[in-house]
Amino acid sequence: MQQALVTADIEQPWAALGLKPDEYQRIREILGRRPTSSELAMYSVMWSEHCSYKSSKVHLRQFGEKTTDAMREKLMVGIGENAGVVDIGDGWAVTFKVESHNHPSYVEPYQGAATGVGGIVRDIMSMGARPIAILDPLRFGAIDHPDTRRVLPGIVAGVGGYGNCLGLPNIGGEVVFDPCYQGNPLVNALCVGSMRHEDIHLANATGAGNLVILFGAKTGGDGIGGVSVLASETFESTGPSKRPAVQVGDPFAEKVLIECCLDLFAAKVVEGIQDLGGAGLSCATSELASNGDGGMHVWLDRVPLRDITLSPEEILMSESQERMMAVVRPDQLDAFMAITDRWAVEATVVGEVTTTGRLVIEWRGETVVDVPPRTVAHDGPVYDRPMQRPATLDALQADAPTSDRLARPTTGEQLRATLLQLAGSPNLCSRAWVTDQYDRYVMGNTALSMPDDAGVVRVDETTGRGVAISTDCNSRFAALDPYAGAQLALAEAYRNVATAGATPLAVTDCLNFGSPEDPGVMWQFAQAVTGIADGCLQLGVPVTGGNVSLYNQTGTTAIYPTPVVGVLGVMDDVTRRTPSGWREAGQVVYLVGTTRDELGGSSWADVVHGHLGGLPPRVDLEAERVLAEILVACSRDGMVDAAHDLSDGGLATALAESCLRYGVGVRVWLDELCERDGIDPFLALFSESTARVIASVPRSEEVRFTDVCTARGVAHLRIGVVDEAAEPALDVQGLFTLPLAELRATHDATLPAAFA
Amino acid sequence: MRIGVVTFPGSLDDRDAARAVRLAGAEAVSLWHGDADLHGVDAVVLPGGFSYGDYLRCGAIARFAPVMGPLVDAANGGLPVLGICNGFQVLCESHLLPGALVRNDHRTFVCRDQPLSIERTDTPWTSAYAPGERVVVPLKNGEGGFVADERTLDELEGEGRVVARYVGKNPNGSYRAIAGISNAAGNVVGLMPHPEHAIEPLFGPDPRSGTGGLDGLRFFTSVVEGLVSA
């Protein structure tokens, strides 16, 4: 620091570290001098878009502002901590969050995806919870694009390789292909964890004299500047490889760290805890100190290194994986160390909590950092960036997929061919080639997983209490109308959770967008955030946390706005969960909800015509809420044996999937439906109107089921009967018969043909 | 009736194996890799997972864990031992079972509901099955291809030591579709699929398969019943 005063005006590499001129100036004002190189490193990573949310903060405030006291009732920890925590009853709490690892996965698919899983799992651990499941929403370019073939196998193997080795069941997620993600795949990962109420831990460093312990893996040179360099800038296709900025994961070390942390929590020897993820030690030390009531002194040379040549700046910026930081009372140090020894986890006292109100970091006898921690961790820059509704949007919305614009199938033969075409299309075909690479059984608590509507895991083995989770986003809808598109993502995830039989309780979101410096993208972002916040308010479920990923573009072309929404629901007893496939011949199939001419952004328009235009389906959150009530009641009282939500690909796709789930056919008639809703068979089969499900109802429950729908004023119609013929088929009476063997062959072939 | 379940660093299905033991009616005793003591248990399960990260070679480091000393001795003395997945790999590395388990022939991790035929039913772990009985149990592995030289394979077949075989598509390239084997005495069994994941209704394979998705439970009730009547 002496040096900083002597050479006050020396040229510093702030631009190379991703800082803007005014940001560098502000650091000088805060400190009253030029920053040391270590301070500059810390500020640069912590003020990066990824860590500081500087472009998104002004909009994200809505999530808090639009949360009512009633919505907070079940919310034990809200936005701002490592992950939100929700009360699921009986003294159990659940924490969950979704995060992105998009840019690292583009640069180094396997490690990028693997460490994406590792990072979100550590967030969940740092709340005091045992991680219990993973979901992974993934988005790629066109299925036949060379870059998709480059990144997909590695990303899938990375998600699987890391998650499988951690012993966490992978219970859901998405695999979506669209040319907009070429050169910018989206790798989001969601983790959920459970704990008793009294086990909740927070990231703060309180109590002067308490010790700061770094434990887990040694610090190496990997991932230096990952958040600032990778996550916060747009790629130039001609630039140098950014591979050294990607972290390398060791899932075995993380598995041991999980068990070690749980033992530490159980022994009650941890006052505060923080994981080391993006921005590494810079983030952990400044956030712990900023959340605490004093300051922190750190001896950086005590940090165990994999590479002894690392400079203090590099040590502070390294994003080496599988590391945690705990604040521990001195009298509990021995007990802490006994537990880390048992798990052979290296633990080192690297600092202590002080009363100075400053974060001071020493390296080889020299003070290299002396800053107010809040200025690093929480008082970063805030930008209210210019927004502009894209001029192209009017033309896009006007280009509706009307029957004179796009030819529609009419005959039975044409409808059958269309259904098959959709069933084998990249976004609707079987995901088994991907999901079979993930362990869905480990822990023995998985009650539902892919391809069902939501993943369901048991939390309490004695009562069967558990949670359901689904993540969704149709970015084509969001491209047509980001406000509606975000609400449609929320509606679909909410509906999926209810379809599985769970009461929706809370929301997490991963907001993947292009560059915030583009006013059009910023407008999309603001619209989507407002849409989610308004929608959550209407549905009465709070946003508990999430992640923003900006700069998802290559060159000047941004991805479609992709606000991935995860909804978590609770079930008293997961053995009452509703699967998506029917099994019992003779059960009647009901369609719940109303079908309109809604094909804007639909799978049919995309797959058959390569068309994107018009308006997305109408959002009706009140209808979604009532539908969810019905579905939860049906699950609780055993009124339905199977239910499946209608979304991409409409009724045709839902019928096909419910048949394929257990290989049991169905006979369907559409005349009554067409007459009631004023539509033709094509619209009945392929429209994507929302707030709809199909349900398979035992005959003994039919009266009760229709009464429940009638009492709530919800349209419902018997459209078919489950039919276990010798040669099972999807039979749409008067139009076509499609043997399931033929349907399955088409449905199953696509991903193996592209990637196996 | 006390059945030990060993936890190595990186074991994943240890809690699942302990649940299976309890559901079969025995007490599950947690055994720690670093403790060279079997604590007087009546049988041992080596669970699935990635012991020591499966670095070097699956099971190759675990075989040197302190707990393995008394375990190998006891196994040679007739203690019933079941190695599941990674546990099977550890048994091969410990030379309690012949052969080795290599990377799946298709090079990717596979998780599926796997049909098996139970071919040897005079072991303590399979006595509750009928010879040739077809069951469905989850399979999940990256390195589950069983390999051995021809002579060993012929020996295994000739002595009736193939405990379970894959039915239908061979999921990992195992020679002669072998899913599980035993030692000559029959007390040590290694199995690549995971019977501990087919023990509770709705938490295992498709409930329409086999006995309501509970086909794995009898591996554990076999040993409990055998020990009770012994």
Image (cartoon, coloured by chain):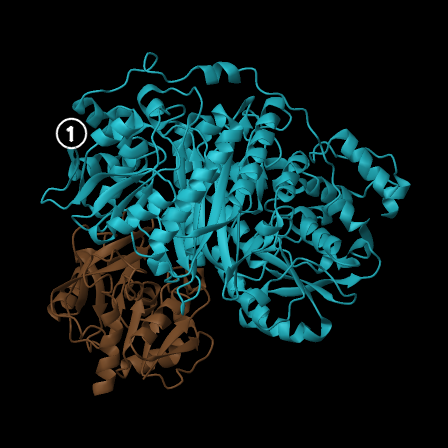
Q: Secondary structure at mark 1?
A: strand
Is residue B105 placed above or below A517 in the rendered structure? below
Q: Amino acid at mark 1?
A: Phe
**Residue A470 visible:** yes
User: Which chain is painted in brown?
Assistant: B
Residue at 88%, 38% in the rendered image: A8
User: Which chain is painted in cyan?
Assistant: A
Q: Tell which residue pokes out farthest to the top in this image.
A: A404
B177 vs B14, nearest the viewer: B14
Residue at 36%, 62% in the rendered image: A444
Q: Label 1 lies in what chain?
A: A
Q: Position of residue A305 (x, y in %)?
A: 64, 56
Residue B99 sits in which quadrant? bottom left
- Relative to A63, B59 lies left or right: left
Is residue A351 placed above or below A30 in the rendered structure? below
Is residue A614 placed above or below A84 in the rendered structure? above
Quadrant where the image shows the C terminus of chain A = top left
Q: Which residue is mark 1?
A: A736
Q: Position of residue B227 (x, y in %)?
A: 25, 84
- Relative to A345, A750 lies left or right: left
Residue A657 sits in which quadrant? top left
- Relative to A139, A506 lies left or right: right
Q: Position of residue A723 (x, y in %)?
A: 15, 44
Counting other residues with Cα less than 10 Å from the Cα at mark 1, is it few (<14), some (14-19), or many (20 or more)? some
Residue at 39%, 68% in the rendered image: B14
